[in-house]
Image: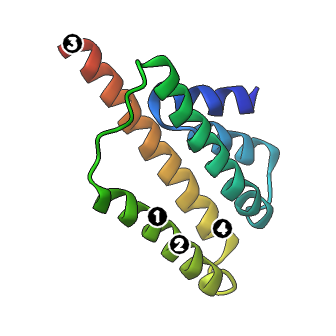
Amino acid sequence: LTGVGAGAGVVLAGVGGPAMTVYAVISRWGVVSFAATMQPLWVLLSVTGLLTKVAFSGSEFPQLPVWFWVGSLAAVIVGLFIGTKIRNRVSERLVRRVVIALAFVGAVLSLITGISATVTG
C-alpha cells in the first residue's frame, strides 16, 4: 500500500516522499537503510512518474531550460556527496526529524498546489 501511495503521489502530484516517510516512521525503519533504499527507489519513482505523465498527457515533456536539468542533476550528486561525508557526524534523531519535516512541507505544498489549481482552473 505504501508503494501504491508513493507511486500515486509521484504521478498525481509529483510527491512520493510523504507516503514513504509515514511508512518509515510507523515501521521504525532505520535511517541508514531508509536512505539506502530511498535513493534508488526515488530514481525509479521519478522516472516512472515522468514517463507516465508524458504517456497520458499527450506526450508533453516538461518545458524546462537545459540549465535546470543540469542543475538538478548536479544538486543530487552534490547532495549525495555531502551526505556521505557528514553521515557519521549527524545524529539519527536529527536526520529523522529533517526527513519528516521535508515530507510534511512537500505534502503541504502539493496540497496547496492542488487546491489552487482546482480553484483557478
Which residue was labeled with disc 4?
Answer: 93
In the image, taking residue 47 as reference, residue 4 lies left or right, namely right
- At x 22%, y 13%, the residue is 119
- At x 36%, y 65%, the residue is 71
Looking at marks 4 and 1 on the same chain, the residue that comes earlier in the sequence is marked by: 1
- At x 51%, y 23%, the residue is 55
* Rendered-image quadrant of the C terminus: top left
Looking at marks 2 and 3 on the same chain, the residue that comes earlier in the sequence is marked by: 2
Mark 4 or 2: in front is 2
In the image, taking residue 87 as reference, residue 118 lies left or right, namely left
Q: Are discs 1 and 2 less than 8 Å apart at CB?
A: yes
Which residue was labeled with disc 1?
Answer: 73
Residue 118 found in image quarter? top left
Mark 2 or 3: in front is 2
Which residue was labeled with disc 3?
Answer: 121
Mark 3 or 4: in front is 3
Residue 31 x %, y %: 73, 63
